[in-house]
Image (spheres, grey):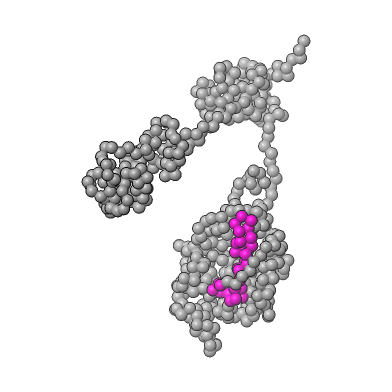
Amino acid sequence: MEPSSPLAEGPALSLSPAERTLLAHLRSASAPQREEEVAAATGLSPETVRGGLQRLRSKHLTVVDEQHAERLVLTKRGEDGLARGLPERRLLDRIFALGRPARPEELAAEGLGPEELPVAIGVLRRHGLLAEGSPFSLREGVGPGTVELPEERTLAAARDGAEVPSEEANALKRRGLLAVERATTRLWSPSEEGGRLPLGDGSRPEEGALRSERLRDGSWREVEFRPYDVRAPVPYLQGPAPHPYLAFLEEFSELLVGLGFTEEDGPLLETEFWNNDVLFMPQEHPARSVHDVFSVRGVEGRLPDPHLLLRVAAAHEGRPLSGETEPLSVGWRAPFNAEISRRPVLRSQTTSVSARFLASRPRPPFRRYCLGRSFRPDAVDARHHVEFDQCEGILGEEGTSMRELIGMFRALAEGIGIRELKIRPSYFPFTEPSVEGYVRHPRLGWMEVLPGGLLRPEVLRPLAVEVPVAAWGIGVTRLAMVALGVNDIRELYGDDLDRLRGGD
């Protein structure tokens, strides 16, 4: 006598009423079922069917066969093209209607603007229908009613679900007229185990949890309780871990602290005065575009101490500071406008934090840094972002020179494991001399990440600083790309949990 199956022993428990209904239907069906067919046959909602089938699958009672399909569909532009005519058809019709060559301005009046007209011209010339040159005329022998455009035939075929040659489809996809729609069909059937499982008659309700009211009123005696299925897979939950980029910033901050620097902080919402003016950035000059900013509306900026404002204005205009007889330089040869200084902006550099520190505590020595977010209206790509982290620092005491600055760059690069470093002369409006440090990214090549120099007298003297000060504004976000092996700056700000956990 064969041993009985363990499935045949004991009550048919571990199923909810919906799961029992779904499994019974799949067992009675002659072929695997789509979710829509199951919902129609059982009267259950699509959400209940989808969830119930997945739960049955987790209990090894169902199997699913996923079939993936692709089909061409018309985009909104493609539907409009069939409805009112593709640009090439409208160009043909206009030339036919005029009975003579058409000038570009006449075609613009027909809606063939600078975006559609070049496409229409290119298509018609590729088909040998349009003569070269402007105004636009048709080749000899091309007449009304004799022109068939393959693009129209292909669009109509795609609309009707007919097969379309791949080369023609790709050309229309590049024009945004066709798109690929991907669909997945799931076909469900009972597993071998699901086909043998006793379902019972369902006469007694089943529940998955014992509630307090059942205990109080004694109704727990009237129901069946589903047992805990120890075979059901459960998700693996990984414990919390620091974001790699945040961990890098913390490590970088610790490097600076280890070199004797103290961290400072400042506001993200600044005024033009602290963001640019105090750093001797000209108010109305193309050089100011080095640090384009995001302006802020609805907020009124406040000017600094009037005495400091006058000293900064004197440096910009090339006048002697109060109490002095000689100007620091010729300045920017333009009047200083305090209303520009008042404008609120998102800070484009953390140098504004150093300026605020020097203005409040001008007595040396200085070993300060700020590691924080800055904002610039850059075009977003692999190397640039509209917001990024910058590490600004100042080192000031008697005898400070470029030697200390370059040594600082080398120490920081080596501290995070970067060995390839190039330094070359550069220009910044508020430092002289100035340098730029470059590190090599394995995919993006050399990237400028370590700009700095000695602050100019036009910056230091209005702040009452009497010693040389080396300053830098490290692109710490780009340094992180090299150190962490990231190829796109946007990945540093991502929240993809699989990537953060080290998954695929």
Q: Is residue 453 left or right of residue 78?
A: right
Image quarter of the N terminus = top right
The residue located at (56%, 26%) in the rendering is 187
| Residue closer to the observer: 421 or 275 | 421
In magenta stretch: residue 465: no
Q: Report the residue that reaches farthest toward the front.
A: 140
The residue located at (68%, 34%) in the rendering is 234
Q: Tell me where residue 3 appears, x and y as whole percent.
A: 76, 14
| Residue closer to the observer: 386 or 325 | 386
* Whether residue 63 can be seen here: yes
Which quadrant would residue 188 be assigned to in this image? top right
Q: Report the residue that reaches farthest toward the bottom.
A: 325
Name the main secondary structure of what is drawn in magenta: strand
Which quadrant would residue 405 be assigned to in this image? bottom right
Q: Is residue 343 left or right of residue 398?
A: left
Give the magenta range. 427-454
Image quarter of the C terminus = top right
Q: Tell me where residue 179 appears, x and y as whole percent.
A: 45, 39
* Whether residue 273 can be seen here: no
